[in-house]
Image (cartoon, rainbow, N blue to C red):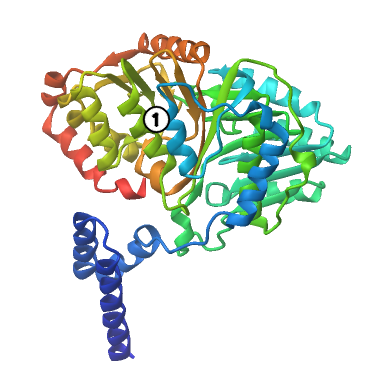
Amino acid sequence: MSLFFNIVLVLALIGILIYIIAENQHPTQTLAWVLVIVFLPVVGLILYFLVGHRPVRKQLLPEAERLLLQQRVTESQAQYIAPAPDPYAKLDSLQRKLGQGTPLAGNATRIYTQFYSMLDDLLADMEQARDHIHFEFFKFEDDKVGRRVAELLIRKAREGVRVRVQYDDFANIFRKEFYRELKGAGIEVKPFLAINFPFISPDANFRNHRKIVVVDGRVGYLGGMNIAERYGEGLSWGSWRDTHLRIEGPAVAQLQVAFLSDWRFSSGELIAEPRYFPASTTVGETPVQVVVTNPTDAWHAAMQGLIQLLGTARKYVYLQTPYFIPTSTMMLALKNAALSGLDVRVMLPERSDSLLTGLASKSYIKEALAAGVKIYLYQGGFLHAKTIVSDDAFASVGSTNLDVRSFTLDFEIDAYCYDPAVAVQQKAIFEQDMAQSVAVDLDAWLARPRWEKLKESLARLFSPLL
């Protein structure tokens, strides 16, 4: 038996090594996996299966069905199609070539930095639902806040409103009973990427990190906030600082497409009836383009969009992110922009909700500072916002972190707002947060104890897992 096991293991190792080399990934990445598997064969095989192997997955949505949903947007919102103004025309063109929808004008937006303000408005909007509520969160927890939301969803379902709830299965793996309760009350509930054995499934490293709510096809929400008590009450050591966005108007149809695409992927059911895409009226002045990132796509829309923005911006780009673990391409774009004279500022929390991720994030600070990127460490609590603002003309709010996972492994969603009023508001929020932050000085950063820098370097080795 031992001889047979050894033969099978050797054949498996040879097969995996040939597969890794044939993938033609970056040589450094390929060599790293080869060394791990050769010197730690059993551990290496398990790790590669969990986080290294990215199987060729089916598209999130077959092309014909994607076009059908986009057609529904065009039919209902045709008069609001508004290509982005200069200098963002190329950014808009890039995203449309990557499969995103065109900007839609006539929207009203509301930015939230306080969880309970967002929650109160969300509950009020869902209370007014007459046809459907589409509700999708990375985390929807069974706590005081989650129960409050669940009670309303259950009541609306009993009133005859179609309520569909979708959640990331891995992130909620211990809340099965909570979701069964929702389903038993008449709500349609689906896990995204259902995982029965999370520690041996290759899907365990893919996450649906989106936060989407659509009410009657007229009002929508997205951003960084999940449904959990800590988003309002904070952590034991500080408050939770986040950003979310409410959209009312034509662009909600693109949020609807994002939700229904995910629903098709997780349930097999295509929902494309015109009732889910009601004609809109002008309710505001903001053109909005919804950008959806999927690891099943050939492109990385969020990362490529930010790279394009860094090349387009004329004066400044300010970014907020809870985790700063950029890809090498993203880091190069940030450094190039700063070296060219652009005012590039990145704000991240001084203290993270994850020790390992926080340490890994800090390992990238020296490289960014050396190129002229300004780094701010937020001290007012845990900064979880994912925002971009540029040149008093462009702003983005969404779920995408400035890290490898969000750019390449997670299902994400962001809203591009081509509106000076929204951008100025978001810039003011960033500047308010700067008052609770400390600017990192390169010389002082380099002078820190060696053991601190060593811990960060070791944590960086786990970046693909974080």
Q: In this view, does 453 lie to the left or right of 301?
A: left
Crowding around mark 1 (Cα neighbors within 10 Å: few <14, some 14 to 19, many 20+) is: many
Q: In which quarter of the image is residue 23?
A: bottom left
Q: At label 1, which amino acid type do we have?
A: Pro
Towards the viewer: 276 or 460: 276
User: Which residue: 30% across, 77% down?
Assistant: 15
Image x and y of residue 415, in percent: 53, 29
Towards the viewer: 73 or 137: 73
Image x and y of residue 397, in percent: 50, 26
SS for dot 1: loop
Image x and y of residue 336, in percent: 21, 29
Residue 64 vertical position relative to residue 387 in the rendered view, above or below = below
Q: In this view, does 180 lie to the left or right of 455?
A: right
User: Which residue: 21% across, 58% down?
Assistant: 32
User: Which residue: 62% across, 49% down?
Assistant: 67
What residue did someone put label 1 on?
322
Image x and y of residue 466, in percent: 36, 45
Q: Quadrant of residue 81?
A: top right
